[in-house]
């Protein structure tokens, strides 16, 4: 009788911990190649954003990779990181998609915020314009001037005194500010219409604003509608790329390192699946993106956009060489030093208010998981 009572108590404890949003230490081992027993699962409330660079997490759920790792995945959709951060801190989600720029700008406000992984490089930002406008694109200036730097300057000059629809609390501001800075301008030289990405793109299509700046699905939708790319990512400069990954709170990390390790395993399983089954993977991603944004993109278009604008770390070796190798151009330390310096000069954060070694624990966790 005592033995039965102990087993019942253990089951009740596991059920209680799983119901606490994944704040329990993961239990048990996952059977090789199969789903974990129900009693060993831990619930993780996951914050997602409707962008291609975060789509693999939805694909992982669809393929059962979270279940194989003993994780019950529950997701909530957010428009931008500025909405993810308070949800992390108030405990309504445990872990969520996040980019490097908002992690810096929000760090002082949310001191418990931690970047726990970097999974991809996003270079698909673009300032969009109307095809029937008098604005000249970067490509047109480049053909005319023959100099990429001068083309970026002349393209940026066209932003002065105009209005742009974009979203605050996200990476978009840094992209816009760099495009303006190329031309000797600042954000004060434009009228910023602050709207969440999907609402903003609908407003832009309806005639609001001269330009639009949002994520890759919104860019794809505008291109489908016949809008033009004024200037894009790497044409703007180094500030127009972003390291994207996952964020959590320090308290969640302290109690759930094993769960974070399993989430890393989920990522690499998903990358393997995308490599081995590209047609099925990109069809799912296209359908998922269309569902989130109201678009009508095809699997081939999703594949093309991702291959052109997103670099996924598909293996631990690639993750190491991209984000943690000292000689990498996108080494996280170099990137964060650049971001902090930029935002201090811009007056967005106070000097000394953000310690990157405190904010970013991704490398420490990565080396712990991949000795």
Image (spheres, helix red, strand yellow):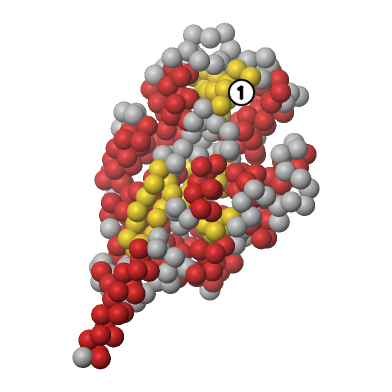
Q: Position of residue 361 (x, y in %)?
A: 60, 62
Q: Is residue 90 left or right of residue 338?
A: left
Query: From the image, which quarter does the N terminus lie in?
Result: bottom left
Identify residue for label 1: 192
Residue at screen point 52% across, 57% down: 248
Q: Position of residue 104 (x, y in %)?
A: 65, 47
Q: Position of residue 212 (x, y in %)?
A: 53, 23
Q: Which sits in the foreground, 43 or 260?
A: 43
Question: Which of the 4 quarters of the picture holds residue 163?
Answer: top right
Q: Position of residue 38 (x, y in %)?
A: 25, 69
Q: Is residue 240 left or right of residue 15?
A: right
Q: How many callouts does the rendering have? A: 1
Q: Which sits in the foreground, 89 or 334?
A: 89
Q: Which sits in the foreground, 351 or 58?
A: 351
Instruction: Find numbered disc 1 in the image and state the secondary structure of the residue it sits on.
Output: strand
Residue 156 vertical position relative to residue 114 in the rendered view, above or below = above
- The answer to whether residue 22 shows anywhere in this view is yes
Circle 1: is it few (<14), some (14-19), or many (20+) Cα within 10 Å? some
Residue 2 vertical position relative to residue 84 in the rendered view, above or below = below
Question: Which of the 4 quarters of the picture holds residue 78?
Answer: top left
Residue at screen point 51% across, 53% down: 90
Residue 261 vertical position relative to residue 94 in the rendered view, above or below = below
Residue at screen point 37% across, 32% down: 293
Q: Residue furthest bottom?
A: 2
Residue 321 vertical position relative to residue 14 in the rendered view, above or below = above
- The answer to whether residue 150 shows anywhere in this view is no
Residue at screen point 39% across, 47% down: 76
């Amino acid at each position: 009788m005592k033995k039965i009572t102990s087993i019942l108590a253990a089951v009740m404890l596991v059920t209680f911990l799983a119901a606490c949003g994944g704040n329990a230490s993961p239990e048990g081992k996952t059977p090789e190649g199969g789903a974990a027993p129900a009693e060993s699962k831990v619930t993780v409330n996951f914050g997602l954003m409707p962008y291609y660079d975060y789509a693999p997490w939805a694909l992982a759920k669809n393929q059962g990779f979270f279940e194989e790792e003993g994780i019950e995945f529950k997701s909530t959709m957010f428009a931008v990181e500025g909405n993810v951060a308070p949800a992390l801190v108030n405990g309504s989600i445990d872990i969520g998609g996040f980019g490097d720029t908002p992690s810096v700008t929000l760090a002082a406000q949310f001191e418990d915020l931690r970047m726990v992984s970097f999974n991809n490089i996003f270079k698909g930002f673009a300032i969009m314009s109307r095809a029937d406008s008098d604005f000249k694109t970067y490509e047109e200036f480049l053909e005319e001037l023959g100099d990429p730097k001068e083309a970026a300057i002349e393209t940026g000059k066209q932003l002065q005194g105009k209005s742009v629809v974009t979203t605050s609390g996200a990476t978009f501001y840094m992209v816009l500010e760099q495009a303006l800075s190329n031309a000797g301008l600042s954000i004060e030289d434009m009228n910023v219409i602050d709207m969440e990405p999907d609402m903003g793109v609908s407003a832009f299509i309806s005639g609001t604003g001269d330009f639009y700046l949002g994520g890759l699905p919104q860019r794809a939708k505008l291109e489908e509608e016949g809008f033009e790319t004024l200037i894009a990512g790497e044409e703007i400069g180094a500030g127009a790329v972003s390291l994207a990954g996952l964020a959590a709170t320090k308290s969640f990390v302290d109690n759930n390192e094993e769960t974070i390790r399993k989430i890393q395993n989920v990522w690499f399983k998903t990358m393997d699946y995308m490599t081995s089954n590209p047609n099925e993977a990109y069809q799912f991603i296209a359908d998922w993106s269309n569902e989130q944004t109201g678009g009508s993109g095809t699997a081939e278009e999703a594949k093309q956009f991702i291959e052109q604008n997103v670099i996924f770390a598909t293996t631990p070796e690639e993750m190491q060489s991209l984000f943690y190798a000292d000689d990498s151009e996108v080494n996280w330390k170099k990137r964060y030093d650049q971001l902090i310096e930029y935002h201090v000069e811009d007056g967005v954060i106070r000097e000394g208010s953000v310690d990157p070694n405190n904010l970013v624990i991704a490398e420490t966790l990565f080396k712990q998981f991949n000795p």
